[in-house]
Amino acid sequence: MAHVLDNPGWAALTGPHAHLAEVRGNVRRYRPDVSVFLGVAGEPELDDWAAIAAFAGPGRTVSLTFEAPVPDGWEIVHDIEGVQLDGSAVWGEPFADAVVLTPDDVPDMLDLVARTEPGPFLPRTIEMGVYLGVRHEGKLVAMAGERLHPPGWTEISAVCTDASFRGQGLATRLVLAVAAGIRARGETPFMHASASNVTAIRLYEKLGFTLRARRLFRQVRAPGR
């Protein structure tokens, strides 16, 4: 039987994140100011690729949450080897210095993301889940939060720390604090990471995450200009 984490984007967009979805046929995507990801129930047919192209627009790129060959006319912009980490053994713990971030904090969150490049983060990404941050003298210097939300699971993402504050364990404590909140809802945390980010993967494994699967993060360009 397929596991819900085998196709987490689709599972999220047809489940807890259905209210954030736009729908064309058998394809769902997050609203463009929320997330770059879209999902399809299974391996996409030609009609599904047509729907993906309509979502993307001629010559525009889209990030996929599934692995499938692309049809003629599509261009693979890049493939990144990644890993999916299972947090079934991670229970987390509170972090007293962390604050819950709100829409008022989004400009500071976008600024931190621009400095640290943890991955895609857009003006309404905060609506995907709970985000925690640490401020120093008013400046946001570290954060982590929730992204994909398949039923029963929540992805921890946007883990980043300002370069001047690294080495203090802020990322570790924020990941554990986000995990504690996920567990309090009766759900299980999971994560994705680039396979080349060995340092981060080692950190997450020390916290109790285990390798569940290897994933391919693919960005493609739709036909046309």
Image: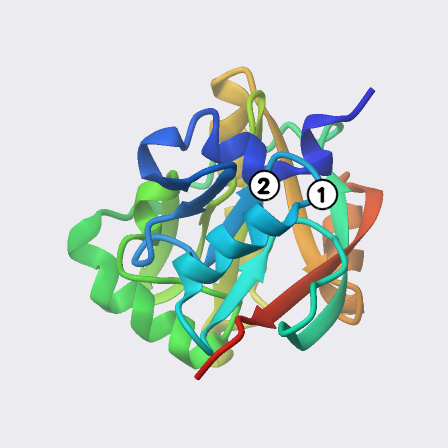
Query: Left or right: 202 with respect to 224?
Result: right
Residue 204 at x, y = what percent? 72, 50
Which is more toward the observer, 46 or 112?
Answer: 46
Q: Pointer 2 and pointer 1: residues touching (CB < 8 Å)?
A: yes
Residue 198 at x, y = what percent? 80, 67
Disc 1 secondary structure class: loop
Look at mark 1 in the image and give the residue it sits on. Answer: 43
Callout 2 crowding tier (Cα within 10 Å): few <14, some 14–19, many ≥20: many
**Quarter of the picture holding the N terminus:** top right
* Disc 2 residue type (three-letter): Val
Residue 151 at x, y = what percent? 55, 22
Residue at the spot 32% in from the left edge and 31% down from the top edge:
19
Separation of disc 2 and disc 1 at Cα? Answer: 7 Å
Look at mark 2 in the image and give the residue it sits on. Answer: 40
Residue at the spot 69% in from the left edge and 70% down from the top edge:
72
In the rendered structure, find residue 200 and report the number of the disc placed on it: none
Which is more toward the observer, 132 or 196?
Answer: 196
Which is more toward the observer, 106 or 142?
Answer: 106
Quadrant of res 56: bottom left
Disc 2 secondary structure class: strand
106 is higher (above) or lower (below) than 149: below
Callout 1 crowding tier (Cα within 10 Å): few <14, some 14–19, many ≥20: few
